[in-house]
Amino acid sequence: MADLIAKSALAGHAPLTLAGVTLSEIALDPITSIAPFSGQDAAVAKALGLVLPAPNRFAEAKGARLVWTGRGQYFLIGSPTPKGLAGIAALTDQSDGWAALRLDGPGTEAALARIVPVDIRLAAFPEGAALRTAFNHMNAVLMRTGAQTVDILVFRSMARTAWHEVEAAMTALAARQRLT
């Protein structure tokens, strides 16, 4: 039997810093999609030990992040699937299906403004905010994890394309900075 070697979706891409922003890959394993059955939200929250976040928000506790990803759907990131959810929620392991990028620095908003069709300025997209949106021609989940930091989840098959899109935006911002 062949020995398989696990590789990240962006293996070989070192962090890149341009125009006041650093682009890097982050590891978020495991990721579990949790969809509470009708009327089971409180039971799911109790089993997780986390408050179910409001739409367009995420909650963090004990190294785990629970992200609202749509009506009645959440991603549990960074924690093994908890026991006690059988019969109260539908669970799907998403760990191998997503890749994560992080943009960090004062140029984060300017770079993302060239890619996403939503207002991601801090006033409109504060820390703890999460949303599903278009990421040029892809789908993505954005999470504001710091004043100048946004984590981006994209389908694993689109990770290199997403990296390229962000790198192109950063390159354009760097060129503009050199002109001024």
Image (tube, helix red, strand yellow):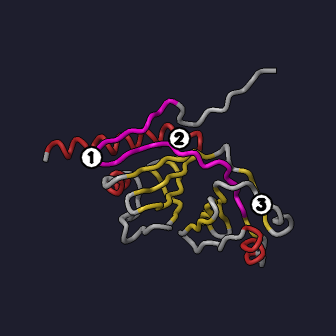
Q: Position of residue 144 (x, y in %)?
A: 46, 62
Q: Earlier in the sequence, mark 1 or mark 2?
A: 2
* Foreground tag (1 vs 3): 3
Q: Nearer the viewer, residue 80 or 62?
A: 62
Res 53 → quadrant: bottom right
Callout 2 crowding tier (Cα within 10 Å): few <14, some 14–19, many ≥20 = many
Q: Earlier in the sequence, mark 3 or mark 2?
A: 3
Locate residue 12 relative to residue 179 in the image: left or right.
right
Q: Amino acid at mark 1?
A: Leu
Q: Callout 3: helix, strand or loop?
A: loop
Asked if the stretch drawn in magenta spans residue 31, the answer is yes
Q: Nearer the viewer, residue 128 or 71?
A: 128
Res 54 → quadrant: bottom right
Q: What's the CA distance linking mark 1 and mark 2?
A: 21 Å
Locate residue 163 relative to residue 64 in the image: left or right.
left
The number of numbered discs placed on residues in the rendered structure image is 3
Residue 100: mark in rendering: none
Q: Position of residue 65 (x, y in %)?
A: 61, 61
Which residue range is magenta in the image? Answer: 12-34
Instruction: Report the residue at 42% width, 50% height from top.
Output: 103
User: Which residue lies under the disc numbered 2?
Assistant: 159
Asked if the stretch drawn in magenta spans residue 134, the answer is no
Callout 3 crowding tier (Cα within 10 Å): few <14, some 14–19, many ≥20 = few
User: Which residue lies under the disc numbered 3?
Assistant: 82
Q: Position of residue 158 (x, y in %)?
A: 54, 41
Residue 173: mark in rendering: 1
Q: Nearer the viewer, residue 52 or 116?
A: 52
Instruction: Report the residue at 86% width, 67% height from top.
Output: 87
